[in-house]
Amino acid sequence: MDERSLSEQRGELFHMAGQMSRRDVMRRGLALGLSAPVIAGLLAACGGGDKSTPAPTAATGGASPTSAAATPATGGSPSAGAGETAWYVDPSPGPAQSGGTINYLLYEDPDSLNPYVGQTSIAVQVTTVILEPLAETLPNGDWSARLAAEIPSLENGGISADLLTVTWKLREGVKWHDGKPLTADDVKFSWEIGKDGEAGSAFASEFDKVTSVEATDDHTVVVKYSSFNPAFVDQFKYVIPRHATGEAADMMNWDFNRAPIGTGPFKFKEWAAADHVSVVRNEDFRDAGQPYLDGINFLVIPSEESRTAQMLQGDGHVMLWPGGEAGDKFRDSTVVQSRTAPGIWTLAMIFNLSKPFDNDPGVTPPHPLFGDVEFRKAVGLAINRDRIANEVLRESVLIDSPLAVGWIMSQVDPWVYDPDEAAATLDAAGWKLNGDVRAKDGVKAEFVCNGYTGYLPNELAQLAIQEDLKKIGISMKIENQDFAVIFGTWADKSPRMIGDFDSLFYDSGFFIEPHNSIVLRYHPDQVPSATNPSGQNFMRWVRKDVGEWLDAAGSTPDRDERRKNYQKVADALRDDVVVIPVVQFLEGNAYSTRLHGFAVSTWEYSTWDAQNWWLAKA
């Protein structure tokens, strides 16, 4: 029997998706009760798509997100302002103390320490302290140069006028752990292996738009694209040394896979299979005085009960993704603290604006209930989201827009719980109470809400909404089915794809570069059809202006300009009430109260800022 928590197993599946078949991802995701968009994202990873960290459980209760200023991070420090997200930052004023080795508790052994061959999310916690990207994401969603000297832009000449050429300047003086210098050729080599799917690269699809990479000198890399890639900053997540690896065709057999050489704050020391991976301080790290720790022991302890005990005894310093029982034990502890940040996953109710079950997957005729915007507004007024966040889904925070995440952070009019106003809205729109259920022109105010089986918290949230709607004369029937039935492909005649549903209830997320996902969900050209079987505008929501705003957002690297256009889309979503966001899930880890300097980020793995960590003397 697998002793790991569901969130642990889900985390593994998320990062392994890139090297698994779509069938295997579907089967395993179903077994773990993963949500619709989560598995959709995993399936995209099989054939190319966004990827990010998994969404593990957390320990804090429902509340509105708040902002916090962060401690200095690599390449810069997060600052307040537009696009800011809530995250947890250790409040200890310091000063930082040097020395000490911490124990980071994992639930299983890494599969490989070469990220290009498709690690588990366990392995990436280790490799993040060894290998580095050209740029990293700060907790507020801003980019910060890491191995790069600066983020390319139109202003600094790093992006060409036609947006098809990106020039990266590397930091000078950076050394690999074996003492050899980092050069632009290493970045080129990372592209050569990264795009080679036949050699085993899990990132091949992410390089589809790259036509060439050239090292014009030791510190300059020129990347050419076939079309503008809004995610160009995130293109090189891991830079690999050409001299310390081997031929790309033999990548699966490299010694590097078990003993990597990087440029990061810690150097690989040893890997004892199924027991531990140890890293030690990189004395030549470019940031003076860092890292503060002498080393990190990543200990493999499959039993959550044992990991929990080690944390409570003070023998563990970080525990990845503690389950609910562990979180309860940590809540009153003086030696352990559970720390979270809003994750990327938001739970929402989605309406079908088109009539279902009419053998027509198009946008007309309108849905007998949800084709009426006043009916949709009434549903929004009737749902007590505070109750769901505080009593049902305690590991969450309220959110008003599906686009109120990351650097986009679109702000819209808040959703107000007012059942009296909901009833009045229905009355004014002609939906009159007739017994327990309202009706209009012979059509009863009753519909089916489709969710997915296997995740009790979401089902409890559905029941809460069902109770709320009943109070105003709307009957909502809950029909949760297997994922494969509801959320399959167009070829499978998935109800979501062909429009045979009333409403859907599941969690979905946007990653740090969300443009492609936003277009798929909300662009008027992305209604699923026989000619566009991959579209994800399941609401059948068609507005020409929304398409124009999204096209404009995808045609510039200027985040401020893009944010303005996404804000217009967010306002339109709110005005038309085609989706009702309920909560944003939290994610995080458990930390020793002796460990300081860390920030829990929505966008990066837990060890993203390990160079800042320091251990207070016992």
Image (cartoon, rainbow, N blue to C red):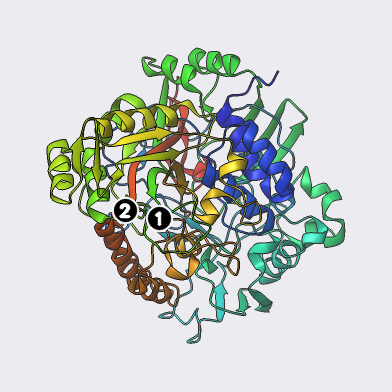
Q: Secondary structure at mark 2?
A: loop
Report which residue position mark 1 lands on: 141
The x, y position of residue 502, in whole percent, is: 42, 46
User: For residue 616, which quarter of the picture?
Assistant: top left
Give the position of the N terminus as an image quadrant: top right
- Depth order, front residue of 30/423: 423
- Depth order, front residue of 400/120: 400
Instruction: Tell me what residue is drawn at x 41 percent, y 39 percent.
Output: 448
Q: Is residue 411 visible?
A: no
Q: Is residue 497 visible?
A: yes
Q: Amino acid at mark 1?
A: Gly
Judged from this view, the residue extending furthest toward the front is 442
Nearest to N terminus: mark 1 or mark 2: 2
Is 567 on the left-hand or right-hand side of 28? left
Tell me whether circle 1 and circle 2 mark residues in contact (CB < 8 Å): yes
Judged from this view, the residue extending furthest toward the bottom is 161
Give the position of the C terminus as an image quadrant: top left
The x, y position of residue 577, in whole percent, is: 29, 54
Report which residue position mark 2 lands on: 84
In the rendered view, tell whether residue 209 sits above or below residue 129: below
The x, y position of residue 348, in whole percent, is: 38, 44
